[in-house]
Amino acid sequence: MITEGEIDIIAQKQELLVFVEVKTRTTQHFPLSELITRSKQRKIIRTAKQYLLEFQVVDKVCRFDVALVTMGQNPSITYLPHAFGEESF
């Protein structure tokens, strides 16, 4: 059972497994460094590792993406593939 945290979206296409963190804001000014802190990144990575172990996922390439959703008068989605990874620590 995963106990570390939560991951907003887990998607798979062939051999690629993508863990997506979704952040919603009401303004368009959202520096990634302020939204997804290094501490939050580490927690997401730990949770992803627990997921891989619990569901015995092997032979997949994993990626960490971020979707930045802006609400309001002009809603938009900014999608950041490869937003962070374990190698950045």
Image: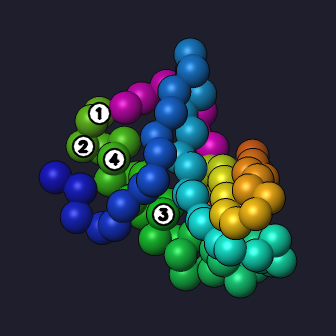
- At mark 3, the secondary structure is helix
The CA span between labels 2 and 1 is 6 Å
Residue behind mark 3: 44
Q: Are marks 2 and 4 in contact (CB under 8 Å)?
A: yes
Eyeballing the image, is 64 above or below 62?
A: below
Residue 72 visible: yes
Circle nearer the viewer, 3 or 1: 3
Q: Tell me which amino acid carries mark 4.
A: Tyr
Residue position for label 1 = 56
* Rendered-image quadrant of the C terminus: bottom right
Residue 36, image quadrant? bottom right
Contact? badges 2 and 1 (CB < 8 Å): yes
Rounded to the nearest whole Å, what is the CA distance between mark 2 and mark 4? 5 Å
Give whichever of discs 3 and 1 has the lower sequence position.
Answer: 3
Question: Please, is residue 50 above or below residue 46 in the view?
Answer: above
Circle 2: residue type: Glu
Q: Which mark is residue 25?
A: none
CA gap, disc 3 to disc 1?
A: 18 Å
In the picture of the structure, the residue carrying the numbered disc 4 is: 51
Expressed as whole percent of the image width and height from the top left, the position of residue 78 reads 78, 53
Residue mark closest to the camera, 2 vs 3:
3
Q: Which badge, 3 or 4, comes first in the chain's sequence?
A: 3
For label 2, the residue is 54
Q: Which residues are magenta?
A: 57-63
- Residue 82, position in %: x, y? 74, 49
Nearest the viewer among 71 and 51 is: 71
Residue 61 is inside the magenta segment: yes
The amino acid pointed to by label 3 is Ile
The tag earlier along the polypeptide, 1 or 4, is 4
Where residue 88 appears, as percent x and y from the top left, is 72, 67
**Disc 2 from disc 3: Cα separation:** 15 Å
